[in-house]
Image: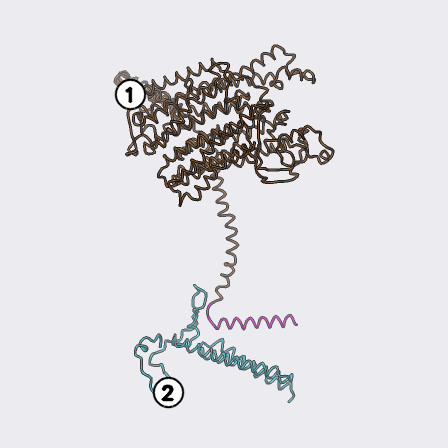
């Protein structure tokens, strides 16, 4: 246990120490050696994470209901009797002290996240040492990286919502600093600002969710605590077992403060249901959408490409976008209490996956394609989390895990290409790089295959398990619906308690569901299933489109590349190779169900040692991990088919794809309806002949009329097609469905107008009043100015007159 | 002659002195004359103070007058020095010439222009030279600011 304490502190501590060291010494002492402390610290963190993972796994096997270990470092803030809970579950009633302890936790979920984050970020740091070589802000970059990893490791290892929120924000700040790293570039500064502001929207929802959790559960800790702040599990079990003493009842203080995700609460499934649960979950989801770039807050992530490429890899794979998925997974018990919220999570995920997949089809910026693919894959993860089954949640986390490897690989590969091409990233300006950069080409191909879900690579297993989880969910819902239909008496109409409990036993997790709900949910999940399948096709296609455009075809090198156009140095290719090996094998190695029924889903079994998944409502809905041969076959076929399609379309002359593009852009139609070309018809010989003939027999007016009618029709018809030209499927995809423009118009512009109005009011009305007050003395002074004429006699006369006035006044008053 | 009528006479003379001085101060533009008028006002006041002192039979009035004499002496010293300097600067004793301390942008007050003095009309005091004649510094004479 003590070793866990040390490891938990060391894992975030090392990157922080490195960040401080580099921040203080980087500019003067370390300079070009600034990467050493950070790389060493991150690698040390990674070793510690592995040790922690081993410890957690060892401890977890000995207990049934999951293992968690909480370390309280120090007390941050203390408000006694902060709030009194009245109308809530009996065990929570009472006045509550508000303790904020700085607590770290070790459980399976945290350990997995920590290992993944530190592994990816140490590789990215090594890569960045090569990539950023010679940059003016070299030390600044590594200080930020250290800080970023510190924030992210803290985010996944803290054990209360307050600290989660603090590091949630810290991650946002670090991403802002890194996206806007080249702040002299206006696009980079704008992208950093956009990322930060869009995240604020999500954070706002997250904060509201925390308020709701506090008012309803009376604590923000994940774990159970005693009122004195102790987290010793034995002591808590002891106190919880004894009935509350008289004194405690009198003071209305609960003997144990049950954490929101604590063992005691999960064991009794004592969660709010109904609208409150829905509100909490939706607000949490809003927060997760901001951080994990889900629709409608996905707009910041593609713009975040303005940062240095290693930062993109870090953000997309390890330290930023995974935070939302982690948070939703962590809060599984809360989401379990609200099926509607889970459905919303699934819908947001499914829709985002589809939308981003469609957008990625036409982008010409290599990093942007990858960015949209990240958004799309995150959508998959949310879809998986939204199924609300343990299988689904495991699948989501598993996809997060494998995705981290191949997405980091792809981004670093793109970075390697950029490095060689002199920072050009437009795929139209380079091509055929496979001979030039063999290592990058090979590793990038493995990354593409993994992302595409090529059989037996890691993406295949994780994506399959997601699709399978959705399918299973549909199946379970339909099955329950049919069962209800077959036995209508036993349906949800059961009112008296006995029937109800019998029903609960029989129906399991669906006990509280109405038949209508079952039906609707089943249908929605089914659509999501189809959409996920279609998105898988899109994913493969756009991945290989980017791959072929970059590495195949005619060799094109932009002039910016100069003498750089060669394979990247060893420092950059080694991380690529390591990641490529991981991306290839990690899926099959951790999910061994495909080998045979005797093998287990190692990752899933480990994840299930997390208390919130091992126990309570989640565990109740748990089926064994299985390998779904049918689904695997279908999605394998889809992947292969899409790869072949992409190969056919993009390898070679690319004539067909031009045709498809022009079709999708309505180019063919608009040519026929072009007003100019229609009016050119009258010059065609046979039409002119008819017109001449008609004029000869006195019917010239008729043909002229007919011609004008045709022209009118052409004009009328061309208008919608002209509009269609702007919103053709191709344009929609290329312009990202005009979402940025829409936000600009609906949100940014009104806010700007409002700000301008405020400025004018402040400038002219508020300032005007103040200035007016300031000018009044000047006005009065002006009246007196003419008296100062500089003539001594006049002054003397004024004195005399003054004396006379005084004398007269004295005489009058005295008289 | 009783005390009251005696006081009355003194006060009449005093107020006449003050009145003449006041009117002179207000209507004359020659600095020296204005200065003399101011002195005359002081004398009028002094006379009244002494008369009251004597009437009330105390020393307060006389004490005040001694102060006035002292102050007037000091004032005369300063004022005459100033007037001398001013004359050196401008070559005129006209008070209306010195309106520079009026508010900015305000036109100068022109009452009645004094006729321009002719160079040959200027009469400088001629004194019998005494002692050793100082060496004439040509340079200084050339660069004398005015006069």
Looking at the rendered image, the quarter that the N terminus of chain A falls into is: top right
Residue B51 in the image: x percent, y percent? 60, 84
What chain is the cyan one?
Answer: B
Q: Residue furthest right?
A: A246
Asked whether the residues under marks 1 and 2 belong to the same chain, the reply is no
Colour brown maps to chain:
A
Q: Quadrant of residue A82?
A: top right
Where's residue A723, x and y in %? 40, 25
Q: Is residue A558 left or right of residue A493?
A: left
Mark 2, Cα crowd under 10 Å, few <14 / some 14-19 / many 20+, is few
For residue B59, the mark is none
- If the image is split into quadrants, where does the C terminus of chain A sit? bottom right
* Most foreground residue, B72 or B101: B72
Give the residues drawn in magenta, as a range. Answer: A789-815
Q: By what rule are the colours in the image chosen?
A: by chain
Instruction: Decide whether residue B136 is among the magenta residues.
Output: no
- Provide the major secondary structure of the magenta segment: helix
Residue located beneath label 1 in the image: A682
Q: Which residue corresponds to the image point at 55% horizontal and 17% vertical from the top-left?
A: A623
Q: Which residue is mark 2?
A: B127
Label 1, secondary structure: give it. Answer: helix
Magenta stretch contains residue A790 = yes
Residue A542 position within the rendered picture, expressed as x and y whole percent measured from the top left: 39, 23
Q: Chain of mark 2?
A: B
Q: Is residue A671 left or right of residue A236?
A: left
Count of numbered labels shown in the rendering: 2
């Amino acid at each position: 246990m003590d070793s866990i304490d040390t490891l938990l502190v060391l894992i975030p501590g090392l990157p922080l120490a490195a960040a401080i060291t580099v921040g203080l010494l980087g500019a003067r002492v370390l300079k070009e050696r600034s990467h050493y402390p950070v790389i060493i610290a991150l690698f040390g963190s990674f070793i510690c994470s592995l040790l922690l993972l081993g410890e957690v796994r060892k401890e977890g096997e000995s207990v049934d209901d999951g293992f968690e270990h909480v370390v309280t470092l120090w007390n941050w803030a203390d408000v006694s009797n902060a709030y009194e809970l009245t109308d809530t579950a009996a065990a929570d009633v009472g006045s509550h002290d508000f303790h904020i302890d700085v607590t770290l936790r070790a459980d399976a979920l945290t350990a997995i996240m920590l290992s993944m984050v530190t592994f990816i970020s140490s590789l990215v740091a090594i890569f960045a040492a090569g990539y950023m070589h010679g940059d003016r802000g070299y030390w600044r970059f590594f200080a930020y990286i250290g800080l970023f990893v510190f924030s992210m490791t803290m985010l996944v290892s803290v054990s209360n919502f307050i600290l989660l929120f603090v590091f949630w924000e810290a991650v946002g700040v670090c991403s802002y600093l890194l996206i806007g790293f080249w702040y002299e570039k206006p696009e980079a500064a704008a992208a950093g600002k956009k990322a930060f502001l869009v995240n604020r929207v999500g954070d706002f929802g997250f904060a509201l969710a925390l308020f709701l959790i506090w008012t309803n559960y009376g604590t923000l800790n994940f774990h159970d605590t005693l009122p004195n702040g102790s987290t010793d599990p034995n002591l808590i079990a002891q106190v919880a077992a004894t009935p509350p003493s008289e004194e405690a009842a009198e003071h209305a203080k609960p003997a144990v403060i049950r954490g929101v995700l604590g063992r005691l609460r999960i064991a009794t499934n004592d969660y709010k249901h109904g609208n409150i649960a829905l509100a909490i979950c939706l607000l949490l989801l809003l927060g997760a959408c901001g951080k994990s770039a889900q629709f409608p807050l996905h707009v910041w992530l593609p713009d975040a490409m303005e940062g240095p490429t290693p930062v993109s890899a870090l953000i997309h794979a390890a330290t930023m976008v995974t935070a939302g998925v982690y948070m939703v997974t962590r809060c599984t018990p809360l989401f379990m209490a609200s099926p509607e919220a889970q459905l919303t999570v699934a819908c947001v995920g499914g829709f985002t996956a589809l939308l981003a997949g469609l957008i990625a089809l036409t982008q010409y910026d290599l990093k942007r394609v990858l960015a949209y693919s990240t958004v799309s894959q995150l959508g998959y993860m949310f879809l998986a989390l939204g199924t609300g089954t343990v299988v689904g949640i495991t699948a989501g986390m598993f996809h997060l895990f494998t995705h981290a490897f191949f997405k980091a690989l792809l981004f670093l590969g793109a970075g390697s290409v950029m490095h060689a091409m002199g920072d050009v990233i437009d795929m139209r300006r380079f091509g055929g790089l496979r001979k030039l950069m063999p290592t990058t080409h090979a590793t990038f191909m493995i990354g593409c295959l993994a992302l595409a879900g090529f059989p037996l690579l890691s993406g295949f297993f994780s994506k399959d398990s997601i699709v399978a989880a959705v399918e299973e969910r549909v199946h379970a819902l339909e099955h329950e619906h049919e069962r209800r239909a077959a036995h209508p008496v036993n349906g949800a109409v059961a009112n008296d308690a006995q029937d109800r409990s019998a029903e609960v036993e029989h129906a399991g997790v669906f006990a509280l569901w109405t038949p209508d709900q079952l039906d609707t949910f089943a249908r929605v999940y089914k659509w999501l299933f189809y959409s996920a399948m279609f998105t898988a096709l899109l994913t493969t296609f756009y991945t290989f489109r980017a791959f072929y455009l970059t590495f195949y075809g005619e060799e094109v090198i932009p002039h910016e590349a100069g003498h750089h156009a060669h394979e990247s140095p060893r420092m950059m290719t080694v991380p690529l190779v390591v990641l490529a090996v991981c991306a290839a094998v990690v899926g099959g190695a951790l999910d061994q169900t495909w080998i045979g029924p005797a093998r287990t889903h190692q990752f899933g079994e480990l994840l299930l040692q997390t208390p919130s998944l091992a126990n309570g409502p989640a565990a109740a809905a748990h089926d064994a991990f299985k390998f779904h041969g049918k689904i695997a076959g279908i999605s394998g076929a889809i992947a292969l088919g899409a790869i072949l399609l992409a190969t056919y379309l993009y390898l070679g002359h690319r004539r067909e794809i031009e045709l498809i593009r022009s079709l999708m852009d309505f180019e063919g139609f608009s040519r026929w309806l072009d007003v100019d070309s229609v009016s050119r018809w009258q010059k065609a010989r046979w039409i002119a002949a008819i017109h001449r003939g008609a004029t000869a027999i006195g019917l010239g007016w008729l043909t002229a009329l007919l011609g004008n009618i045709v022209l009118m029709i052409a004009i009328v018809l061309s208008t919608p097609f002209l509009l269609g030209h702007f919103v053709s499927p191709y344009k929609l995809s290329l312009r990202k469905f005009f979402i940025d423009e829409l936000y600009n118009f609906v949100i940014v512009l009104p806010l700007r107008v409002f700000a301008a109005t405020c400025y004018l009011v402040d400038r002219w009305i508020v300032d005007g009043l103040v200035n007016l007050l300031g000018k009044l003395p000047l006005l009065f002074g002006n009246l007196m100015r003419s008296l100062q004429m500089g003539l001594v006699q006049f002054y003397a006369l004024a004195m005399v007159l003054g004396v006379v006035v005084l004398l007269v006044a004295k005489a009058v008053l005295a008289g | 002659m009783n005390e009251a009528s005696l006081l009355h006479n003194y006060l009449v003379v005093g107020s006449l002195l003050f009145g003449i001085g006041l009117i002179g101060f207000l209507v004359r533009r020659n600095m020296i004359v204005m200065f003399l008028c101011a002195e005359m006002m002081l004398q009028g006041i002094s006379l009244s103070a002494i008369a009251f002192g004597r009437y009330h039979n105390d020393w307060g009035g006389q004490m005040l007058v001694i102060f006035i004499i002292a102050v007037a002496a000091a004032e005369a010293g300063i004022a005459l020095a100033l007037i001398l300097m001013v004359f050196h600067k401008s070559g005129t004793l006209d008070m209306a010439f010195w309106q520079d301390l009026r508010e900015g942008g305000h036109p100068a007050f022109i009452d009645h222009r004094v006729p321009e003095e002719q160079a040959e009309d200027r009469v400088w005091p001629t004194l019998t030279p005494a002692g050793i004649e100082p060496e004439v510094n040509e340079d200084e004479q050339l660069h004398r600011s005015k006069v």
